Image (cartoon, grey):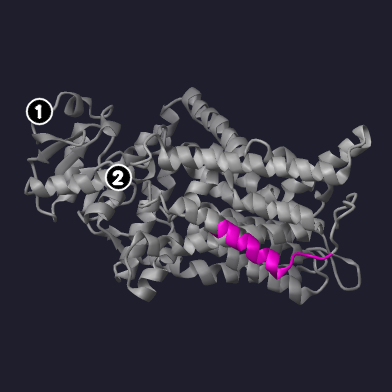
Amino acid sequence: MTYKYTPLPIEEKSGLSIRTSLILFAAGLLVCLATSTIQRSPGYMDAEYYMTGGLRTALGLGGTEPYLWNYLNPVSGLPAPAFTYWMPLTSLLSAIIPILFKVNSFWAARLPFILFTGLIPPMTAWISWELFHSRKVSLLAGFLAVFPGMYLPYLGTVDTFPVYILLGGIFIQIVKYFQNPSRYKVLAACFLAGLVGGGMHLARADGIIVVIVAGVLFTFWQRRGEDGEPISIQSQPGYWLAGMGCIAAAYLVVMGPWYWRNLNLYGSFFPPGSRLTLWLTNYDEMFSYPPTGLTVQHWLDSGLGSILKVRLDALLINLQTFFVIQGGIILWPLSFLGFWPLRGDIRIAAMGLIELAIFIAMTVFFPLAGSRGGFFHSGAAVQAFLWATAPAGLLQCIQLGKRLRGWDLVTAWRVFSMGLLTLCILISVLFTYRRVIGSDLSHPAWNESGRINRELGQALEQQGIDSKEVVMVNNPPGFFLATGRPAVVIPTNGETAVRAAARRYHASILLLDADNATMLESLYGTPGDREGFRYLGTVIDNRLYRLDDQ
């Protein structure tokens, strides 16, 4: 289906040129680099985790982790098996430059992600051109991706965002070939969709949703053969089996080694702790020790009111993420106006199904993870299509203005397109300034996590604490990345749990910061010696204890 619109008088009939694509690539790269020059460290635990995994992979140690950031999976000790909660693709990508050039640095680890970010604007413009065949609409779409709003600070670090945006955009474009009259092209598209979906699953656990969407669309979306006759499952079951087989085979090409690894480690396709997150009643339980209390009965015992409240809270937060972060306040209404004339297009159906399935998963089944960043991360899968369709919605509004108010299309397009782009630039700059720089230009907020962890490591060294001693901290991956010291997370369910986990994993040092103060109020608020805890002093607002029963 081709979108019908009133062409602008100065509309160019040619498509996007290589020169235009290179300009968009360069613009996206420069904006990302401008932000990245301020970011001297990964910035938060997710990125620190992925970067650490990548650097260890480059050193040939990628199968293990000398830290634990939760206790969901049974681990005999440190080093523990790697990637038992988060998926490994981001770390594998971050290892490419360190492996090739033997350079272990933040810049080396994040360079692939910066390059991926540069590819997003030309890909977005290409998607828009494929949908609307308007050079001006697609060019604006590309520049919206250059200034990606609240996603900007997270694109140049080591995280899943640029990977998910790219793969999501590619996947949704691939499924249009499910409607091709040629069976061979359809089966090839099925195979490619399985590969991309497998890549998305290897990046994030919710990527399996994309593979399911591919199967649903192939099964239920009506196709016509070369003779123009409809093809259905009932009329040609062998064809359906071949298509589903191609999706599954390609998916297993990517994910098969991962499942094999899990079978060897755990005797199951998924780490056993994965299902425990279904039974969380509050987010702090993610870090409880031991996790054996996370059961269906525990979840039911919290009461229907509590269960519903958690999901209602997640619904409100995820809606805010949907409209404000993903949609940049104004983009979703414009996107809806843009793709509504194309609502019969399989690509629009793919975008809608992916977004809806992710929203439900992150609101109903995993509300605590979803509302604390999970939906923000996974919603990036449809972000390119949002940028691609919003300019067409703007054009719809301008055409309405022409009919009702007699607007000049060329002038109105110039004014409103620049206004929309300016708004996206302002949102990108203001949010990035607040998130990356903060209140002190000389000490950017983004770098504080790494700086504090390095200073804590120096303080432990000054105290004469051996670098091999296991430390209990709030952010084990970040602490290890900055100090090289093995670490486990502080349990959130009391002093008894802290001592039990310390015995289990031979932790001898506790660094207690303000984030853990509510769970261990007496240890933080009134520091001092007590049974099992010997107080050594305060370091950068962290209470330092030696755990004596080790």
In the depicted structure, whether residue 235 falls above or below residue 304: below
Q: Does residue 272 show up?
A: no
The residue closer to the viewer here, 235 or 416, is: 416
Left or right: 369 as drawn, with respect to 176: left
Left or right: 235 as drawn, with respect to 198: right
Q: Which residues are magenta?
A: 14-29
The residue closer to the viewer here, 397 or 549, is: 397
Q: Which residue is mark 1?
A: 528
In the depicted structure, whether residue 473 falls above or below residue 214: above
The tag on residue 475 is 2
In the depicted structure, whether residue 168 falls above or below residue 335: below
Left or right: 5 as drawn, with respect to 66: right
Q: Which residue is depicted at the point 75% across and 74% down?
A: 185
On whether residue 533 falls in the magenta region, the answer is: no
Residue 472 pos. (x, y %): 21, 44
| Dominant secondary structure (helix, strand or loop) of the stretch shown in magenta | helix
Q: Does residue 495 show up?
A: yes
Residue type beneath disc 1: Gly
Give the secondary structure at mark 1. loop
The residue closer to the viewer here, 26 or 337, is: 26
Residue 512 pos. (x, y %): 21, 36
The crowding category of the residue bearing disc 1, from other C-alpha atoms within 10 Å (few below 14, some 14 to 19, many at least 20), is: some
